């Protein structure tokens, strides 16, 4: 599905906002691809973010999915908008045991206020998802919150 961004400078704005998130730096996450209504975030396995069996912790995976959905939505929002998550649902499909991960998100429907997205995390270039997410995000304007 092709989307038309409301901000011609969405790429620069999204990358700047992503760069301001200390959480992304701490977790070693970076943007691999960015387009109107879509983003890919990549990151490596990190023993600091594992659970008791050595798999990547569900919270680590959830952070990647939520962030990917948020920034995919932001690509289609007005230049003055900030984005926040309203709700999400995650399905964990298999243990996250990879060395490298990719969180890919795309917008299903972008409204003036609410945007719906889907995302997946895959490991080691395998197409089988480790986890999936559906999310609803809100565009906030004139609230004092800036991305």
Image (cartoon, grey):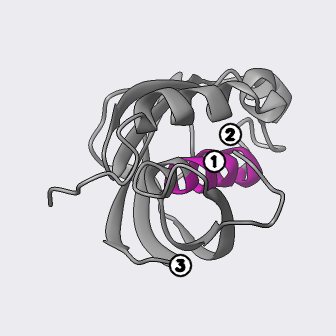
Q: Nearer the viewer, residue 103 or 84?
A: 84
Cα separation, mark 2 vs mark 1, equals: 7 Å
Which mark is first along the chain, 3 or 2? 2
Q: Which mark is residue 107?
A: none
Residue at x 53% of width, y 36% of height: 14
In this image, 22 relative to 141: left or right? right
Mark 2 in CB contact with mark 1 (< 8 angstroms): yes
Does 60 lie within the magenta span?
A: yes
Q: Is residue 144 above or below residue 133?
A: above
Q: Nearer the viewer, residue 9 or 49?
A: 9
Residue highlighted by disc 1:
61
Residue highlighted by disc 3:
113
Q: Residues within 10 Å of mark 3 (few under 14, many from 20)?
A: few
Q: Residues within 10 Å of mark 2 (few under 14, many from 20)?
A: many
Residue 10 rendering spot, x and y as whole percentages = 43, 38
Which mark is first along the chain, 1 or 2? 2
Q: Quadrant of the C terminus?
A: top right
Q: Which mark is residue 56?
A: 2
């Amino acid at each position: 599905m092709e989307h038309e961004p409301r901000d011609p400078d969405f790429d620069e704005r999204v990358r700047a906002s992503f760069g301001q998130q200390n959480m992304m730096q701490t977790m070693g996450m970076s943007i691999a691809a960015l387009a109107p209504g879509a983003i890919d975030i990549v990151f490596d396995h990190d023993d600091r973010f594992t659970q008791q069996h050595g798999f990547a912790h569900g919270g680590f995976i959830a952070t990647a999915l939520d962030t990917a959905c948020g920034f995919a939505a932001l690509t289609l929002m007005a230049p003055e908008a900030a984005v926040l998550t309203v709700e999400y649902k995650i399905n964990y499909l298999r243990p996250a045991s990879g060395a490298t991960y990719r969180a890919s998100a795309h917008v299903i429907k972008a409204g003036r206020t609410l945007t719906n997205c889907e995302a997946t995390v895959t490991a080691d270039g395998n197409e089988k998802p480790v986890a999936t997410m559906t999310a609803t995000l809100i565009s906030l304007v004139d609230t004092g919150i800036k991305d």
